[in-house]
Image: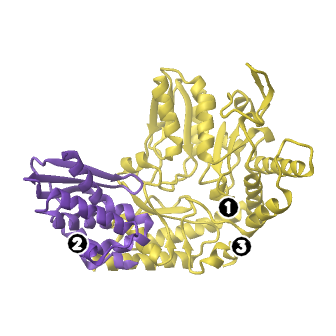
Amino acid sequence: MNSIYSELILEHNKSKHNKRELTDPHAVERGHNPNCGDDLTLQLKIEDGKIIEAAYLGQGCAISQASMSIMIDMVLGMALEEAQEKAEIFFRMIRGEALTDEEMETLEDAVAFESLNKMPARAKCGTLGWHCLDEGINSLK
Amino acid sequence: MLYKEDFPIFKHHKNLVYLDNAATSQKPQMVIEGLKKYYEEENGSPHRGAHILSVASTTIYDKGRKTVQEFIGAEKTNEIVFTRNATEALNVIAYAYIDHHLKSGQNIVLSITNHHSNIIPFQRLCKKHHAELRYMYCDEAGHLLDGELNKIDENTLLVSLPMVSNGIGVIHDIKSVFDKADSVGALKLLDGAQSVGHMPVDVKALNTDLMVFSGHKMFAPQGIGVLYGRYDLLNSFEPFLSGGDMIEYVEEQETTYAALPERLEAGTQNVSGVLGLKLAIDYINSIGLDEIHKLEKEITSYAYKKLSSLDFVDVYGKEKRGALVTFNVKDVHPHDVASILDNSGVAIRAGHHCCQPLMKYLKHPSTCRASFGLFNTKEDVDALVKALYEVKEVFYE
């Protein structure tokens, strides 16, 4: 199981390159897991229906912060619809549904969280950032 | 060691190091077998019907109450009310008594170390009745600060605190708090969830008006708890849940209620739970509370010293404590610690331990907690320490 604490995830947890405050974001979405205390806020800047800047703030475990950070790297420059499609695929992966090879490919580095589908206690940590993204985009509609 | 053999869970999880006893204890063989026997041979509805099984279940239920009464030193059996758990017992106190007596201008005084279940019912009632909710604050180790007792005054209706805090493990000086409460005539409520079954607890010696505890934290099944109340006080409680078994006469428009304790026990009761609690107490008595307390103290001190010696671990509180140690691995979130420990077969609790006000006050929003029972050994603590080195390896190297 320690595979979940892969170098990629530990690296993102440490680097904090996506952890900062944005000036004048278009969407700010706070995600909170009351039972474990993860409390992260995603900020998005949008132009022409695309995410041009994203960053997060807050406190959380390594899994929640790394998942948020990997997601931000992935969705920069992406159209809002495409970002939400990726979120849906990510949620299906965590629920343990079988994904096609093509779907796995579109998740890029986020496939590092696949083993969370066998760790129900930690699934919410991994999906927190993606829920912020999905809700944040919905709030713009 | 010896006592582990009494717990079948370790036959099914041979390498399990179970350090989450403050959340729920494992169950000894004699409790599990007793429940099986009850459902195979004795199951019936208590307090109704003349048939053989109804009589059998009533006898078991009543014996359970007698056992609890003697175990906590209550004067009468009808001072013992069975509930689902400590949380339900606290809600009975809140809604069957405090709700009917709390007035604007009065206050309720809690310790900041209280569990959520010993905060929220009173927080809701203080809002409802425009009364004041006061907290007694503590030092870093959880001991109440000098002068905090002065928050208890002539307008205090109720003072409530845990004997042992589940969030930081401090053993409170109950006598000083309750002496102060007596000096102003306030009601005294003791949360015994982390102390009953771990150390001798006598409601008379502790001079408490009310006490609550859960069976499942002391080897009994989940779903059985106890409300103790001094008879004259408990007898003034209004009905909480109403329905079957708690009545005397029911007319179309009016009802008169049964005497204690049935008045506060509506509906068909949890006979197997009461039997499980009785058997758990029999098990505890067969070993002796003094012996259990001694064993838990030894293992807790050993764990406290071992964890304190690790330079990458912060341990909270002083060595003298209940059977639990709270700590953090520096710069690693407790849930990551708990997941890696779980992978090594070590079960601990991580998070806020249902003590958010305490955790916010102490500025550790979440911690790891290792909590001990009589079956834990020094080898279990050594396994915890070894697994913590694995956490260090994953995160620091």
Relative placement, left or right, of B136 versus B274 is: left
Q: Mark 3 points at which residue?
A: B6
Where residue A104 sits: x, y (%)? Answer: 28, 75
Where residue B151 sits: x, y (%)? Answer: 47, 32
Mark 3: few/some/many CA within 10 Å (<14, 14-19, 20+): some
What subunit carries mark 2? A
What subunit carries mark 1? B
Q: Mark 1 points at which residue?
A: B219
Q: Earlier in the sequence, mark 3 or mark 1?
A: 3
Q: Name the residue under label 2.
A: A106
Camera-side residue of B96 and A130: A130
Where residue B104 sits: x, y (%)? Answer: 48, 20
What subunit carries mark 3? B
From mark 2 to mark 1, how far is it between C-alphas? 50 Å
- Identify which residue is drawn at 73% across, 70% down: B29
Say what secondary structure mark 2 lies in.
helix
Camera-side residue of B285 and B242: B242
Do the residues at discs 2 and 1 belong to one chain? no
- Identify which residue is drawn at 81% across, 49% down: B61
From mark 3 to mark 1, how far is it between C-alphas? 11 Å
Q: Is residue B215 above or below residue A5?
A: above
From mark 3 to mark 2, how far is it between C-alphas? 52 Å
Camera-side residue of A31 and B274: A31
Image colour assigned to chain B:
yellow
Q: Quadrant of the C terminus of chain B?
A: bottom left
Say what secondary structure mark 3 lies in.
helix
